[in-house]
Amino acid sequence: MDRHIFRLTDDTGIMQHAKYGVPDPTKGYTTDDNARALIMAVMLFERYGEQRYLDLAYRYAAFMLNAQTAAGKFKNFMTYSRQFIEEEGSEDCFGRCIWALGRALGSDKLPPNIKQACRDMLAKALPNILSLKWLRAKAYSLIGLGYIADETKGLMASLAESLACQYERYRESEWCWFEDSLTYSNAILPWAMFVAYRYLQKPRYLEIAEESLAFLATVTFREEYFKPVGCNGWLVKGRPAAEFDEQPLEAGETVLAYLAAYDVTNNADYLTQARKAFAWYHGVNSQQLNLIDGESGGCYDGITENGLNLNQGAESIITYWIARLALENN
């Protein structure tokens, strides 16, 4: 089942895209994908203890090491010829890197040498955190710092307060959200607030986390199955949600948000919702389509109004594995 991961990964890192089940070198690599792949590899190694998964973790960490700038930020897009095409990646990319580095440092299974490399990257990156402007970058960073909370509570408090203030600015009686639209990676925002509450113990953070997650569920669980906001138009306040495309990333991060809620509250309803979100991959979705290709081991890139997007890129299979392993740990 992991064979598509190895098929996508070469001696540089994990390739971004696939044409159907075939890796597509013309689209190159992203630090986004390699950071999340590091999380996946760490979790696979923790679960199964196999050297090949540890080798993947080294590969993805090396990609991140190469991507980091002198200022501690991260370049994102790399061509197949190993040339980065930008001087600096997005804030979202930076946040995902903080998530990955924190997750690696929080592992009790990784050997010290890879953890030290991750620690050095994180130390170089940390001075940039308080200048972040984008919501999701702050949320990813907060989640990553939670794995090493004893060392980072000051930064976590600043990020959590920023997210909480943003939520309170936009919240209305019928709109319990952090901005005036639902777009991509929505679930990481309440997830980050659950992390903030777990380590900072401010009741206000738990209230925001639960209220915003419940609001998101009114959109994504309108039926008995999970249906994410479609990426072709999203959901702007006061308008209907876009129906398609449904992307695997949204299901995976929703699983993680509900598991964080369960971890903090011990409310079994959250665990049930996590399982429902994961079932999206296996056909419990708007079109009763299985997103997992049993032959290739890949995950299709989404559900369109015409059926499956038959490409099987890195983000899809990585987010599937992270969600699956996290759920199996519960």
Image (cartoon, rainbow, N blue to C red):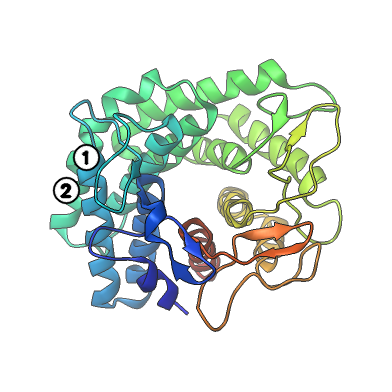
Please give left or right for residue 218 compared with residue 82 in the image. Answer: right
User: What's the CA distance linking mark 2 and mark 1?
Assistant: 6 Å
State the residue lying farthest toward the left.
Answer: 113
Element type at mark 1: helix
- Residue 147 shows in this picture: no
Residue 188, placed above or below residue 109: above
Residue 229, placed above or below residue 309: above
Residue 201 location in percent, x, y? 51, 34
Residue to which mark 2 is pinned = 117
Residue drawn at point x = 56 percent, y = 36 percent? 193
Residue 290 location in percent, x, y? 69, 73
Report if the CB atoms under discs 2 and 1 are less than 8 Å apart.
yes
Residue drawn at point x = 73 percent, y = 57 percent? 304
The answer to which of 140 and 282 lies nearer the viewer is 282
State the residue lying farthest toward the front.
Answer: 26
Q: Quadrant of residue 323?
A: bottom right
Residue to which mark 1 is pinned = 121
The answer to which of 264 and 226 lies nearer the viewer is 226
- Residue 98 shows in this picture: yes
Q: Residues within 10 Å of mark 1 (few under 14, many from 20)?
A: many
Residue 54 location in percent, x, y? 25, 68
Q: Amino acid at mark 1?
A: Met
Element type at mark 2: helix
Q: Amino acid at mark 2?
A: Ala
Instruction: Give the mark count.
Output: 2
